[in-house]
Structures are given as structure tokens and as C-alpha cells.
Image (spheres, helix red, strand yellow):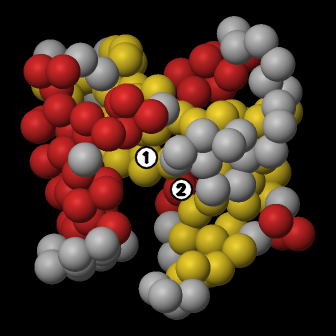
Amino acid sequence: MLPEVTVRVREVRREDYDDVARLTAAAYVGEGFVSADDGDYLPMLMDTEHRARHGVLLVAELEQRLVGAVTLAEADGEYADIAREGELEFRMLAVHPDAQRNGIGRALVRAVVEHARSSEGIEAVVLSTEEKMGGAHQLYAAMGFGRQPERDWEVPEYGIRLLVFRLSV
């Protein structure tokens, strides 16, 4: 039997910014979702201070080490791509590669849903994910998110098709 791990999710603090930038880059580059020499998206992913200033940035700790992060945005927020009025969108979910398979992604998504449920005027949580992120799709489906294929979209400059998931809260 595996020992139970306790994942703690909280809002980011200024002293976390560098660790969050590193773990986010490690997750996205390590999984092949962005190249290490990407000059556009990778710097945005790593700009933790900007993400925290223009959205809600949650972090996950495992044994007092930052191992995950996710950005939340409401409709018309700087980081919202697909959120409509009454929806909370989450983006840039990252779990450090050496901490994966410990329930960290699940804990972060659970915290997003709890945040949405405690926010006035929020009726649903939405997200976009790349087609190739199959493990994430399984997690979202297992947590009750449903596909919204009519809302799928593309980022032509990167040639990426994004799938949309939604959960009523």
C-alpha cells in the first residue's frame, strides 16, 4: 500500500514566484507541450507575477515543496480565453514532472471548483486543453467535466486545436 500524501492548495505568495515559474516551465517543457526555446508562450507561462496580478493563482504544496500551480480567470479577465459571463476559467495547470501521479492535478482542480462554488455569480468552471493532453482529459471527465465540442477553438499561429470542458457548479 502506498503512503497517503497530503497536498495543500493555497494562493500564491510573492516569495513563491520563482518556484512557480520553474515548475511550470518544467511541466510544459518536460511533457513536450512547449519547446524550451519558445519565445512567446513559455515566457507568459513563467511570468508568475503577472499571472497573480491579473487572475487568481493557486499553488499546490507536497511535503512543503511547491509542486503545482493553476491560474483562474473570470470572463473578460486578462487570462480568460473562453470564459463567458458566470464562468470561471482555469488555465496553465502545471504539476512538476517529478511530482506527478500524486493527486496534485486533482487537488488543484478540486480547489478551482471550490473557489468557483464560493464565488458569487459563478455557475460553471471551464477550461481549454490540447488534444494531445489525454491524461488531463481523463482527469477532467472523472471529476465531472463534460466536453463542449461546439466551443473548441484553434490557435492558428501555433497550429494547436484546443478542446473545451465545462462543469456546472
Query: Which of the 4 quarters of the picture holds residue 155?
Result: bottom right
- Who's the residue at 21% across and 38% down the image? 20
**Vertical order, 38 against 11 (above or below):** below
Q: Nearer the viewer, residue 169 or 122?
A: 122
Locate the C terminus by quadrant: top right
The label shown at residue 93 is 1
Label 1: few (<14), some (14–19) or many (≥20) C-alpha neighbours in 10 Å = many
Q: Nearer the viewer, residue 1 or 141?
A: 141
Q: Nearer the viewer, residue 95 or 34?
A: 34
Q: CA distance from mark 1 to mark 2?
A: 10 Å
**Residue underneath mark 2:** 136
**Vertical order, 105 against 35 (above or below):** above
**Vertical order, 87 against 32 (above or below):** above
User: Could you tell whether 122 is left or right of 53 in the image?
Assistant: right
x, y percentage for residue 166? 78, 46
User: Could you tell whether 53 is left or right of 108 in the image?
Assistant: left
x, y percentage for residue 103? 41, 34
The amino acid at mark 1 is Leu
Locate the N terminus by quadrant: top left
The amino acid at mark 2 is Ala
Query: Which of the 4 quarters of the picture holds residue 101?
Result: top left
x, y percentage for residue 89? 64, 41
Label 2: few (<14), some (14–19) or many (≥20) C-alpha neighbours in 10 Å = some
Q: Are marks 1 and 2 in contact (CB under 8 Å)?
A: yes
Give the total number of marks visible in the rendering.
2
User: Could you tell whether 87 is left or right of 4 in the image?
Assistant: right
- Who's the residue at 35% across and 47% down the image? 94
Query: Which of the 4 quarters of the picture holds residue 35?
Result: bottom left
User: Could you tell whether 38 is left or right of 126 in the image?
Assistant: left
- Who's the residue at 70% across and 14% down the image? 119
SS category of the residue bearing label 2: helix
